Amino acid sequence: MDGAALVRRYYDALDDHEYETLAGLLDPTFVQQRPDRTFESREAFVAFMREKRPNPDTSHDLAELVVDDERGRIAARGRVLEGEAELFEFADFFELADDSICRLETYSR
């Protein structure tokens, strides 16, 4: 799977509550950093998304992906929606390795 397809599948898995698929997209060493917290493992991230996400009934509307296949990096920009209502905008910065996501930095407003 190419990097852009991998990132799109990540958002689909989140939106469709496919947590086993989500875990399969993440490297065992996965780390996510965001301003309010850091997840130090794939298991912690998936557990949060499955059990503690403040609003699980949202979707991601991607506006743009910027792909640097040579360095294994992708930047994504979009909106998180609840139905048709925009909750916030986000920017995600992915680092990929061996067809999986190994690092994610997330920013929102």
Image (cartoon, helix red, strand yellow):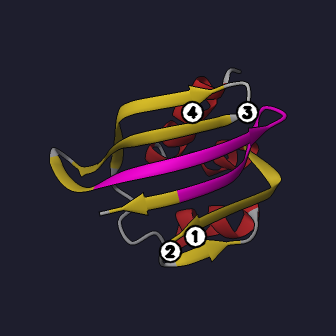
Q: Amino acid at mark 3?
A: Arg
- Residue 25 on image: x %, y %: 71, 41
Query: Which quadrant: the N terminus?
Result: top right
Local crowd size for mark 3, using a 10 Å CA cut-off: few (<14), some (14–19), many (≥20): few
Magenta residue span: 89-105
Local crowd size for mark 4, using a 10 Å CA cut-off: few (<14), some (14–19), many (≥20): some
Residue 28, compared with residue 37, is above or below; it is above
Q: Which residue bears the numbered disc 1?
A: 48
* CA gap, disc 3 and disc 2: 33 Å
Towards the viewer: 23 or 96 = 96
Residue at the farthest bottom position: 36
What is the magenta segment's predominant secondary structure?
strand
Question: Measuring 50% from the left and 74% from the top, which residue is drawn there?
Answer: 52
Residue at the farthest top position: 2
First along the sequence among labels 4 and 3: 4
First along the sequence among labels 3 and 1: 1
Q: Is residue 59 magenta?
A: no
Q: Amino acid at mark 2?
A: Lys
Q: Which residue bears the numbered disc 4?
A: 9
Q: Amino acid at mark 1?
A: Phe
* CA gap, disc 4 and disc 1: 18 Å
Label at residue 52 = 2
Question: Measuring 67% from the left and 42% from the top, which residue is drawn there?
Answer: 21
Secondary structure under the numbered disc 1 in the rendered image? helix
Question: Measuring 50% from the left and 30% from the top, which residue is drawn there?
Answer: 66
Of circles 4 and 3, the one toward us is: 3
Q: Which residue bears the numbered disc 3?
A: 71
Of circles 3 and 2, the one toward us is: 3
